[in-house]
Amino acid sequence: MKNLLLAASLLIPGMLFAQKKDMTPKTFDLVVGTYTSGSSKGISVYRFYAETGKTAYLNKIDDVSNPSYLCVSADNKFVYAVNEGTQGEVSAFKFDAKSGALTFINKVSTLGADPCFISIDKAQKSLFVANYSGGNICVLPINKDGSIAPAVQTIRDSGHAPNKERQEKAHVHTTVLSPDEKYVMYTDLGTDKLNITRYKAGKASPLTPANPAFVSVAPGAGPRHIDFSADKKTMYLITEMGSSVIAYDYNDGKLKQKQSVSLLPDGFTGTTGAADIHVAPNGKFLYASNRGDANDISVFAISPESGMLTFIERKPSQGLGPRNFAIDPTGSFLLVANQRSDTIHTYRIDKNTGKLTDAYYKIEIGNPVCLKFVPAQ
């Protein structure tokens, strides 16, 4: 009898651990932002099954003009979408993760043309919007009911860079919070700068320039999107026209460049347009998309000691214009939004090598340009 009790006592902790492990989310909502100049009319939601990589259509909301970039609140109850156009706006939606239903709340001006990126702090106090053609960012407070209040601050860049067609003035592309949310960083493709601001919620002017207030990239490179390493000690920046990834040592808002790697194979002569960049959930690998004639995803290993990158492989995006992509929270699959071929293509990720293999799953949807995963309830 004593032996049986001992055996049971040894088994129970393992059983409890297994039960806890099984509670990890295996299904998610895939929220898709689009351009509405084609067949899409707004935002669509699909159920994503992380064990298989398969998706099933759930819901959509139409009459949303060019929701080209999205963010989701930390409590997963609200979705915010830019409305990219000459009269820039941002829309708020109540979100039901169980059904995938989106309910419109309100819409406000972004005080700039062609907003192309939006982010939100974890406390759900502020939204940060990048106005590409307006060359400025704006800060919009969030009310307790999830609605958006009018902007309280805007910062406009000035200047230009060598490319006379693309860099004739400021073109802000990204507004990203630092891991500790003490800073907001925003890239300016038009002036080849990555700007750094201190963030304090609730202030009349929540953003103030850091010291130093920016770092510059190579002339004509065109900085675009950024992401951080798992240990938060390295920041990675993708340059749109330079088609490169720059790694910086990061420490309390300060950046020091330590590496730059190209996304292009030797001898490449076609057009390019690097777009998105993400670190895998396990922190071991970095992925970057490139458009133009490249239409591929580059894979890099991340050194756990230095954060430096080592090239692994380059995979076709199985479509045209891989503007945005997303890695599911389990780190098992990578989904690519191919804007110019109206498809979202799924790859399986080898968590040991980082390599991608075609899962042969495809969603057909007009002009997909932003993918966000939300735990399904």
Image (tube, rainbow, N blue to C red):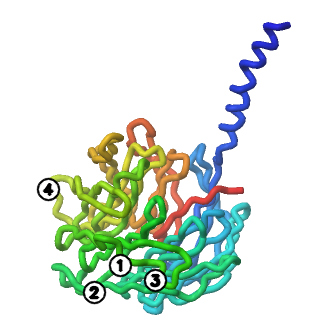
Q: Give the residue drawn at x 39%, y 59%.
A: 227
Q: CA distance from mark 4 to mark 2?
A: 35 Å
Indicate the quadrant containing the N terminus: top left, top right, bottom left or bottom right.
top right
Q: CA distance from mark 2 to mark 3?
A: 15 Å
Of the two numbered discs 1 and 3 in the rendering, the one whose residue sits closer to the viewer: 3
Q: CA distance from mark 4 to mark 3?
A: 41 Å
Which one is in front, 358 or 289? 289
Q: Quadrant of residue 125?
A: bottom right
Sequence-earlier tag: 1 or 4? 1
Q: Position of residue 309 (x, y in %)?
A: 28, 47
Q: Describe residue 23's horizontal placement relative to residue 267 as left or right.
A: right
Q: Secondary structure at mark 1?
A: strand
* Crowd rating for badge 1 (residues with CA inside 10 Å; few <14, some 14–19, many 20+): many
Sequence-earlier tag: 2 or 3? 3
Q: Position of residue 12 (x, y in %)?
A: 75, 24
Which one is in front, 281 or 295? 281
Q: Quadrant of residue 157?
A: bottom left
Q: Secondary structure at mark 4?
A: loop
Instruction: Tell me which amino acid carries mark 4.
Output: Gly
Q: Which residue is mark 4?
A: 267
Sequence-earlier tag: 4 or 3? 3
Q: Position of residue 202 (x, y in %)?
A: 56, 78
Q: Which residue is mark 2?
A: 158
Sequence-earlier tag: 2 or 1? 2
Q: Quadrant of residue 86?
A: bottom left
Q: Secondary structure at mark 3?
A: strand
Instruction: Tell me which amino acid carries mark 3.
Output: Cys
